[in-house]
Image (tube, rainbow, N blue to C red):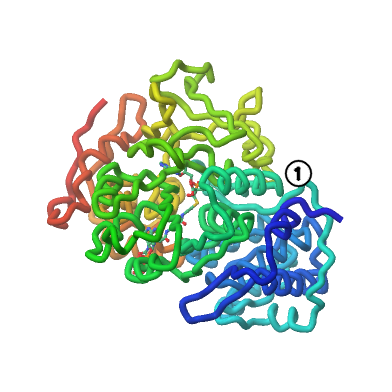
Amino acid sequence: MSNHLFDAIRGAASSDAPFIETPDGRAWSYGDMLGLSGRLAAALDTLGVQPGDRVAVQVEKSPEALMLYLACLRAGAVYLPLNTAYTLAELNYFIGDAEPRLVVVAPKSKAGILPVAERYGAHVETLDHAGGGSLLDLAQDEDPDFLDAARGPDDLAAILYTSGTTGRSKGAMLTHDNLLSNAAALRDHWRFTAADRLIHALPIFHTHGLFVASNVILLSGASMYFLAKFDADEALRLMATATALMGVPTFYVRLAQHPGLTRAATAGMRLFVSGSAPLLAETHRAFAERTGHAILERYGMTETNMNTSNPYDGARVAGTVGMPLPGVSLRVTDPESGAALAGGETGMIEIKGPNVFKGYWRMPEKTAAEFRQDGFFITGDLGKIDDAGYLHIVGRGKDLVISGGYNIYPKEVETEIDEMPGVIESAVIGVPHPDLGEGVTAVVVRKKDAAVDEKAVLDGLMERLARYKQPKRVIFVDELPRNTMGKVQKNVLREVYARLYQLGAGKADHTADTPKRAN
Ligand code: MCA
Ligand code: AMP
């Protein structure tokens, strides 16, 4: 039986070749990968997971967690990875919406998740980052030669939740071919071969670490150092025996500040890729000056996988995200009418191709609203194409903050703050942050004489929202700036607080400011 994505992975796997190594000296070959993912797929089958069933997974990063993703592909299940930072309140929504057959969590989270899972009829198992947990116990007794479930190109491989600009998070449905076509295009474009060794320091619950990094390595039969999280010292140490690094801009900002970043330290590396958020041209330049390497920037989205990339050969232009990948069609349009714009004009970036997702899980209207009649997906990113054909992302048509590569939808944070006692209203914005790119910042109007302060707001959010969504600062103002239509002018707030996180900007300077009203 054919399994569209896993057959391709199997085809690239040479049993004796190394696949994963961890800093504590554990190692897996491709043969080990086939065996463990086969046992885990068999365990899923024993637990009653059928092709098409969702398997929700919130566990710490580990090689076993990656094997569980592969096991889901092999069992025909739909993999649903969840950020380890999500609170129980957030998990409740995802589990209720996706209705998974099975939820896999870290042992410490089991007691908390049980009532939620029970409410929606899901079974709970555990996976431990140290290589234990109930699921691995079950897998131990299973046959490694699992007969993979039949899955075609259009069958679902994964659902990844992306927050919505209004209200509820949406589950992006990704098919076997969305993932395979994109990973194969990236492998070829970035020249990955079995000789490569990637420093993998990204989380594996998002597109970047799971599909871009891991699938490209799997389809190349290459290997990776698998780190629980990014650490500049460790990354630099591993560069002596690695060939490539994929990261968010924060990785490169931190590396560029490290005294150990030199030509000698990076001499064996052939490729540094950046994405998920804009890489500042100054970071690109600083990195090139220190190492001689031009970071290769690319652009993608959960819904579309990767869309564009700077060239492998040829100029990697700082501040641009390059050209469409082979097979991907890209156009820039008038955001209102959808009419295509001429080169050099700024408009909405729209994408079509085998990389583009199938739609939002159980949200046909939302899906329809984000596609044009002719099948182009409306990204919400604003851009322009220059004379040389490079795409520049010049802004966002969507109200979104990207902090350290994680997306935060202000509406979700504002809704929580607005419900707090003593609060009249709030506006959440992203302002330049030297380490994270943008810092989540809340501007709040409180009731006259209300006792609510910065600490009360932050404490109130602790149990409700993942840590990375919580504001780094909360500022109180008398009123929010509004235009004549009554809409809050976030651009004015972003200007007023633009220097908030710059070194030396005093906390007291920004409390109780009233931004100027502008039209
Ligand atoms: C951690 N913290 C953060 C973030 N990460 N706060 C804001 N933004 C963040 N990104 C908080 C923690 O809760 C903690 O708070 C404090 O900062 C330090 O935590 P620590 O774990 O030490 O942070 P770190 O290890 O230094 O993490 C920063 C990081 C990490 C390395 C930038 O966030 C990261 O790996 N980001 C990658 C995200 C990613 O993979 N994005 C791709 C999405 P406290 O101490 O107060 O408790 S896919 C995507 O966007 C599309 C498809 C694409 O194009 O790729
Ligand atoms: P996500 O919803 O996590 O998939 O994030 C996708 C968003 O990240 C895109 O719509 C862009 O706004 C942003 N993004 C990804 N890569 C880049 C990049 N290289 N430069 C600027 N923005 C990027």
User: Is residue 386 depicted above or below 117 in this figure?
Assistant: above
Q: Report the residue at 36% width, 68% height from top.
A: 231
Q: Position of residue 93 (x, y in %)?
A: 60, 58
User: Is residue 57 depicted above or below 361 in this figure?
Assistant: below
Residue 22 in view, yes or no:
yes
User: Is residue 80 depicted above or below 115 in this figure?
Assistant: above
Q: Amino acid at mark 1?
A: Asp
Q: Position of residue 473 (x, y in %)?
A: 27, 56
Out of 510 and 180, give the one closest to the viewer: 180
Out of 126 and 217, give the one closest to the viewer: 217
Looking at the rendered image, the quarter that the N terminus falls into is bottom right
Out of 351 and 235, give the one closest to the viewer: 235
Q: Report the residue at 75% width, 81% height from top.
A: 138
Left of 388 or right of it: where is 211?
right
Q: Report the residue at 78% width, 58% height from top.
A: 76
Residue located beneath label 1 in the image: 154
Left of 360 or right of it: where is 417?
left
Q: Quadrant of ligand 1?
A: bottom left
Q: Secondary structure at mark 1?
A: loop
Question: Which quadrant of the view contains residue 516?
Answer: top left
Residue 464 in view, yes or no:
no
Question: Which quadrant of the view contains residue 90?
Answer: bottom right
Left of 236 or right of it: where is 55?
right
Left of 257 or right of it: where is 112?
right
Out of 321 and 44, give the one closest to the viewer: 321
User: Is residue 196 depicted above or below 168 in this figure?
Assistant: below
Q: Report the residue at 76% width, 69% height from top.
A: 41
| Mark 1 surroundings: few (<14), some (14-19) or many (≥20) residues within 10 A | some
Q: Position of residue 409 (x, y in %)?
A: 45, 47
Q: Position of residue 53 (x, y in %)?
A: 77, 59
Mark 1 close to ligand 1, CB under 8 Å:
no
